[in-house]
Structure formats: C-alpha cells, structure tokens
Amino acid sequence: MVGEPFRATLTRSTIFAAAVGAGLLVTLPRHGGLASDFVDAFTLAFCFAFLGHYVEVVALALPDIETGIGRLVRVAVWFAGGLWCYVVARFLWVKYGRDLNELPSLVWGGVIFIAIELVVHAVLHGRGRPSFFSGRS
C-alpha cells in the first residue's frame, strides 16, 4: 500500500466511494435531485477513502508502529486522521449548499474511520496479506 501509484489509489478510492456513496444515498436526507445527492454522498465517502489512504501511509511511516504501544498510537492516528477526513468532507458538504446539522457530530469522523480501517484490515488478514491484526503492515 505504501509505494502504490497515485492512479491505483485514486481508482480504488473512487470505486469504494461510489459503492459507499450509493449506500449513503439511502440514509442521508434528500437535498436536490438524485444525481446531486449522489455527488454529496460520494464526496463524503471519497474523503474517507482517498485521504484515509494517506493517513494510513503516514501512520506506517512512524517508527515501531506495528509493535507494542505503537499499535495504540496507530489507532490514535486513525482517529485523528478520521477527524481530518471528516472536516474536509464537512467543508465540502457546506460548499455544496448542505446543512451540517444533516451530518453526525465531528467526533464520529474518527470513530467511523477506525471502523473502516478495522474492517479493511480484517479483510486483508483474511486474505493472508499483511495487516494490523497480523502485526506486519
């Protein structure tokens, strides 16, 4: 994941955001037409997928992040990174003319990002690839 080409990151993030955005479309309040509501939902998901990749890259660059207390630091980085991703998403949400009261509070960005990372790493671990659970990323 660390040395991955930008294009691969962008493609994976776009596919993930399109799938999650379609799911969010059902749960988020309607604002405009179907297409504009999908763009809003896609943007939320894309911020976590695309920016989240770089949060993980930064976390992996920290020394001893895969052992001992480093694993706890990594979860803390995920939380802080999730807040950052959500701040960007909420900024764009407002720029799209939406009301921030339609979204959960800011702290949920960190919680959601940790959940996303744990699911992604569980899938990686299940496939026998390096992950948070295997102690080697």
Image (cartoon, rainbow, N blue to C red):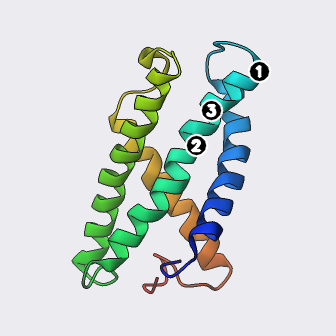
Secondary structure category for the residue under label 3: helix
Q: Amino acid at mark 2?
A: Ala
Callout 1 crowding tier (Cα within 10 Å): few <14, some 14–19, many ≥20: few
* 63 shown above or below 118: below
> Earlier along the polypeptide chain: callout 1 or callout 2?
1
Callout 2 crowding tier (Cα within 10 Å): few <14, some 14–19, many ≥20: many
Secondary structure category for the residue under label 2: helix
Residue in the image at 33% along x and 37% along y: 107
Residue 33 in the image: state x and y as whole percent: 74, 15
Q: CA distance from mark 3 to mark 1?
A: 10 Å
Locate residue 80 relative to residue 127 in the image: left or right: left
Q: Amino acid at mark 3?
A: Ala
Residue 51 in the image: state x and y as whole percent: 46, 54
Locate residue 16 relative to residue 55 in the image: left or right: right
Instruction: Please name the residue that numbered disc 3 is placed on.
Output: 41
Residue 102: assigned label: none
Residue 43 in the image: state x and y as whole percent: 58, 38
Residue 91 in the image: state x and y as whole percent: 40, 30
- Would you identify the image quadrant in which residue 83 lies? top left
Discs 3, 2 touching: Cβ within 8 Å: yes
Residue in the image at 34% along x and 70% along y: 58
Instruction: Please name the residue that numbered disc 1 is placed on.
Output: 34
Locate residue 28 relative to residue 89 in the image: left or right: right
Question: Nearest the camera: 95 or 126?
Answer: 95
Callout 3 crowding tier (Cα within 10 Å): few <14, some 14–19, many ≥20: many
Question: Nearest the camera: 108 or 91?
Answer: 91
Residue 45: assigned label: 2
Q: Amino acid at mark 1?
A: Leu
> Earlier along the polypeptide chain: callout 3 or callout 1?
1
Q: CA distance from mark 3 to mark 2?
A: 6 Å
